[in-house]
Image: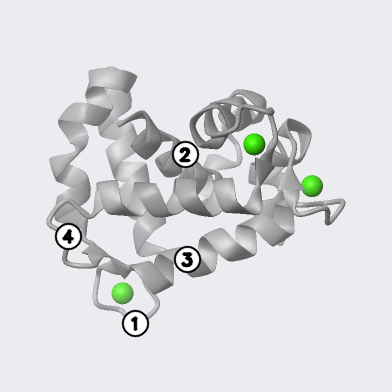
Amino acid sequence: MKHLLAASLVLLGANTSFAAVPGAESLAKLITHEFDTNADGILDQGEWQNGIAGSFDQMDTNHDGSIKPEEVDAMSDDISAEAGDIGGVILVGLIKQALLALDQDGDKAVNRKEFNTLTDGLFTKLDADKNASLTLAELSELPVKMVSK
Ligand SMILES: [Ca+2]
Ligand SMILES: [Ca+2]
Ligand SMILES: [Ca+2]
């Protein structure tokens, strides 16, 4: 579940409406904490991709290969358990909005390919020094990078 929340936050960071929300550094810390399997404080490309891919599997609760808004609704209890009732409601709404922004073929669902276009592009954008890994400082630029394109 924590994994899922971290991925949701990646999505939210990529959504421009979230850019105004402070706390980019705590966002970066949370994502690093959840995805950093070898605990060196840095996310390499594999850790990033595995983290995102694992989150896709968790969000695709009926395992049909795509995430639908109903599946996000179904997670609201879990999300509220971590974020509080009001925070949960807000997060679920934002997650659905961010998800549907990824929907390229207009079927109101996000398949793995659509999900991956964002995550692959994001890694490249965030990796400012192009050394194929993301430091906390680089990851803290997530909301900024998304607005500036
Ligand atoms: Ca690492
Ligand atoms: Ca789609
Ligand atoms: Ca880097």
Residue 116 got which mark?
3
Q: Residue sitting at 51 percent across and 69 percent down? A: 117
Q: Earlier in the sequence, mark 3 or mark 1?
A: 1
Of residues 40 and 105, the one nearer the viewer is 40
| Within-10-Å neighbours for mark 3: few <14, some 14–19, many 20+ | some
Tag 3 secondary structure: helix
Give how far across and how far down residue 106 sits, in percent: 30, 79
Display coloring? one colour
Q: CA distance from mark 3 to mark 1?
A: 14 Å
Tag 1 secondary structure: loop
Q: Earlier in the sequence, mark 4 or mark 1?
A: 4
* Mark 3 residue type: Asn
Q: Nearer the viewer, mark 2 or mark 3?
A: 3
* Mark 4 residue type: His
* Mark 2 residue type: Leu
Residue, disc 2: 9
Q: Residue sitting at 70 percent across and 35 percent down? A: 42
Q: CA distance from mark 4 to mark 1?
A: 19 Å
Q: Looking at the picture, does residue 124 appear above or below residue 139? A: below
